[in-house]
Amino acid sequence: MSKLVPPHGGKGLVCCLLEGADRDAELKKAEGLKKLEISARAKGDLIMMGIGGFSPLDGFMSKADWKGVCEKFLMADGTFWPVPVTLDTDDDSIKEGEEIALVNNGEVYATMKVTEKYEMTDADKKWECEMVYKGDGEDSADDKFWEVAMEDHPGVQMVMAQGKFNLAGPVKVLSEGDYAVRFPGVYLTPKQIRDEMEKRGWANVAALQLRNPMHRSHEFLAKIAIEVCDGCVIHSLIGNLKPGDIPGDVRIKCIQTLIDNYFVADNVINAGYPLDMRYAGPREGLLHATFRQNYGINNMLIGRDHAGVGDFYGLFEAQDIFDRIPYVTEACPAPGKALLCKPMKIDWTFYCYKCDGMASMRTCPHTKEDRVILSGTKLRKGLSEGAEIPDHFGRDEVLVILRDYYENLTEKVEVKMQKAASGATMK
């Protein structure tokens, strides 16, 4: 019997991906169905449903699910879920009860039975943003949230740009895209990661979420986890990010270089998952823990400004939300449907010259003048502007890869610094 944490929702891994003759037959049927062009975000959501990463979801959420998730972190059946997983459209012609094909850039990714079609007014979208994306940070203050969010919050912009309807219903997934080809040995399904961890004898496992190049602080977090757990999965987002972020292939190369030179390889797994970033801050931290449970991971590393953007979220709001949402514990009203993946809360980490090593606010007694403030945003800004990177910010082998990437960029995007990334809020 497996010692790994069971998949979320109490139904095992719910995998909607068809294979072999079943897939061939469904693809043939899809040729005669109405085609709906879907977003990159929806494509990633579909793939996660296909491989079991979004268990127990087997399709896009109903209005009752959407409302419950936004308002109470619960789907209609009482299952904990922190962020809506919905499919939007402006197509008036799609009817309830109809089967449609879901297409992205000419490729059929799934078929779907539309069980519900519900209107999403601007007021509905705004309410969703206030429930899901509004945090406790400076830019989320009541008098300025919308003014700043519509200019600088990619998650809010994405929701407000969605179509006037949401479609709900079960899906049959027909493609995983090109992730296995682009990221061989790194794009791994929940079953593949579970099998590997079983082979290694792991039971107590941590995940490090990455969307930025891995710098010394990330390395420190992973090694903390390895010290207290059986192993750590360095789990990178390889879907789409916002302009100015570094693409997955470059980040994966950096991680593997670090593993090869600075880790005991048997204690770490370099893996990627196919979602687009939602930039939902604390809510996305909960989502990261939710789907990591499906990968067999029972600890989610949560550091400073996890999944944040700009100054919309408090520095440790993504840690605090685990304590103030009762349904992430056994208090969930539906037995077996609570979140079992727990947060590993790590304080602000940095390199300290006086400590002569990596440290955190809990271990270092010195001042911020003695510290190298580490953040992915600060690293990207320095590299994009050709600036010198401070000593101890990143490993030399990684900086060579990143400098080469930036030197060969034909179009550069300005990287905006938030206060936390610059160290302005550190005492």
Image: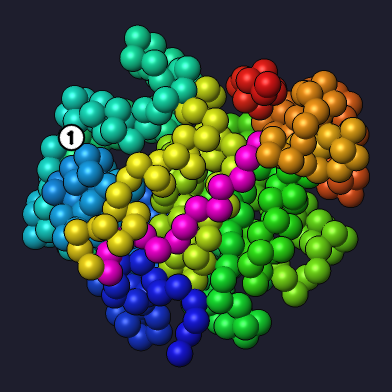
Task: State the image quarter where residue 244 is shown.
Answer: top right
Residue at the far front: name it. 365
Horizontally, residue 20 falls left or right of residue 62, namely right
Quadrant of the drawing holding the N terminus: bottom left
- Residue pictured at 50% horizontal, 81% vertical: 3
- Residue pictured at 85% horizontal, 26% vertical: 370
Residue nearest the observer in this picture, 69 or 229:
229
Q: Which residue is mark 1?
A: 120
Amino acid residing under circle 1: Met
**Vertical relation: 48 (above or below) 249:** below
Horizontally, residue 100 falls left or right of residue 158, namely left
**Vertical relation: 361 (above or below) 419:** below
- Residues rendered magenta in the picture: 336-348
Counting from the top left corner in percent of width and height, residue 151 is at 45, 17
**Vertical relation: 69 (above or below) 291:** above
Horizontally, residue 345 falls left or right of residue 117, namely right
**Vertical relation: 316 (above or below) 301:** above
